[in-house]
Amino acid sequence: MNARAIDPVVSAVTERIRERSRDSRAAYLERIAAAGRELRERGPARGRLACANLAHGFAAAGPEEKGDLRGTAKPGVAIVTSYNDMLSAHQPYETYPPELKRAVRAAGGVAQVAGGVPAMCDGITQGRAGMELSLYSRDVIAMATAIALSHDMFDASLLLGVCDKIVPGLFIGALHFGHLPAIFVPAGPMTSGLPNKVKARTRQEFAEGKITRLEMLDAEAKSYHSPGTCTFYGTANSNQLLVEVMGLHLPGATFVNPHTELRHALTEAAARRAVEITPHGDEYTPLGEVVDEKAIVNAAVALLASGGSTNHTLHLVAMAAAAGITLTWDDLADLSKAVPLLTRMYPNGQADVNHFQAAGGMAVFIGGLLDAGLLHDDVLTVAGRGLDLYRSAPALKEGTLVWEEHPGNSGDLDVLRPVGEPFSPDGGIHMLDGNLGRAVSKVSAVKPEHLVIEAPARVFDDQLDLLRAFEAGELDGEDFVAVVRYQGPSANGMPELHKLTPPLAVLLDRGQKVAIVTDGRMSGASGKVPAAIHLSPEAARGGPIALVRDGDVIRLDSTAGTLSVLADLSGRTPDGAPLTDAQWAGTGRELFHAFRRTVGPAERGASVFGGSGDGGRG
């Protein structure tokens, strides 16, 4: 089946990104092309190392691998892993290195674990000091990936990562070695546990004091119960979906559960494919050419069509920049108007990613968007040329992995719909502009009657102060917009404020009109409370949010795309301040003072790479 002519909005956005990025993209491609030519002309990378360098590189290898690594007949494949056994999403990676090594060897290559990257869990650190290191960890992971690949031993890489900052970090780091092919190897979601509707209701009951901590813990343990990714459609699963749409997973690999025969077969197939697409084969597929302007637009379309995580309004911008491509919030805003919402997964509905997979999953999702002309088909992928390859779904036939073209129909219209019958005509993520700056609003989980709110501000400089006010009953019975500031990238690392969702949802359910405006994040699991997040400029960089006072009327109109304070802010000076370096300490935060000084604004990806600092504070 052939894709239709590309949608005019998608085409126009792609073209303006290409024009805007012309010089930086050309410089990037020139750099990786030179490195790629050297690989193709001179054989495996390790062949250029001096004898002492190379001896260090294989000293710990077994006898067979040592023989392979001494010579230059076999391409070298790097394994970069985020394995740890505390986090459910990454625990399955424990067994991947030997499995991948065997498969690479069988395909004619030799693999080594080149390095590990940190993998922290936002679910554990929510509302804690550690959350203030979460966004920074993305750039640490990018640097750790670069360190792993810097040994010049490798001709391709297998990247093992799943969750929030881990995949974007691996992606950014690997793009700085964009002449090397790279395949992301997913671990898959855990099986479904406690229904999402029950989980959300239980959290609100706990916030109201209706159930005990033991009862709450029991419910959470039934939700997060086994190895694999958390099943709600937050940032982790958004990562996985976007990576497949960009052609960096094997087709259909994204949402296959861990420790199944199909999962093992796909893992082995990824290893074999990594060997096939090295510079020394007939299908050289450098990462930097896979990730082009069309792939980035495809990722943005998929994010919007799936109701994905707002965190990717930061991550996609930073990921694109690593490939010399400039993506802006305006691009996302224009695409959102043209891209319909095709899925309902929690927090946008009650289903989880296993239900999405059962309804047809990625093959149906990608196929529908291709047929509507909303995705570019003429792209390079790790599976070959053309995204049309991703209409196929993997299966085992008598123990052999095959890909079968899916008929294209959703098996559950409550979870996954065709483009002609969407859940919503737009993509569910709106950009807001006004005299407070620019912000992001995820509207796909918000009821229509809550999309516009005009109410007095209640200003907080710390999320804990809002929680204390709720517990003390100080927020009962009044309409308000919670303004939570000094939560931006340079203030304290831009933590997720998802811990505020349950209490604000309680007030919303009581009939109060409530919303939140913040220069922080709300996470991929943000739900039904109307929110303007990632506000830029942030309070710590002189943003108008620092001038807002209690009682100032805020108007948040997610339908019109506006965010304004209906008060005269002229003549005011900032009220409050970010923590000083001396105050911002503990839980390792003092190690990241340099990040606070150099991190860029949310609109540019909140990255320390190319960010503009303020010279420090405190």
Image: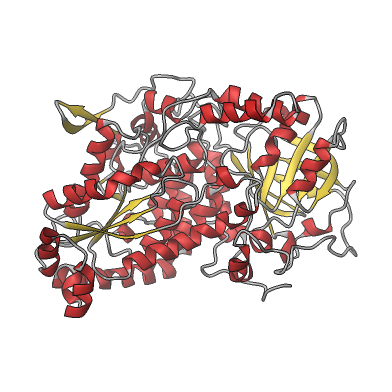
Q: Nearer the viewer, residue 67 or 390?
A: 67
Q: Nearer the viewer, residue 413 or 106?
A: 106
Camera sees residue 324: no
- Which residue: 58% across, 67% down? 591
> Looking at the image, is 200 positioned above or below residue 337?
above
- Answer left or right for 312 relative to 191: right
- Which residue: 65% across, 24% down? 201
Q: Position of residue 371 (x, y in %)?
A: 36, 33
Q: Position of residue 87 (x, y in %)?
A: 46, 43
Q: Position of residue 12 (x, y in %)?
A: 47, 50
Camera sees residue 592: yes
Q: Nearer the viewer, residue 605 or 85?
A: 85
Q: Quadrant of residue 36?
A: bottom left
- Which residue: 38% across, 62% down? 145
Q: Quadrant of residue 587?
A: bottom right
- Answer left or right for 92 relative to 342: left
Quarter of the picture containing the C terminus is: bottom right
Q: Quadrant of residue 278?
A: bottom left
- Answer left or right for 134 relative to 267: right
- Which residue: 18% across, 54% down? 275
Q: Position of residue 283 (x, y in %)?
A: 17, 54
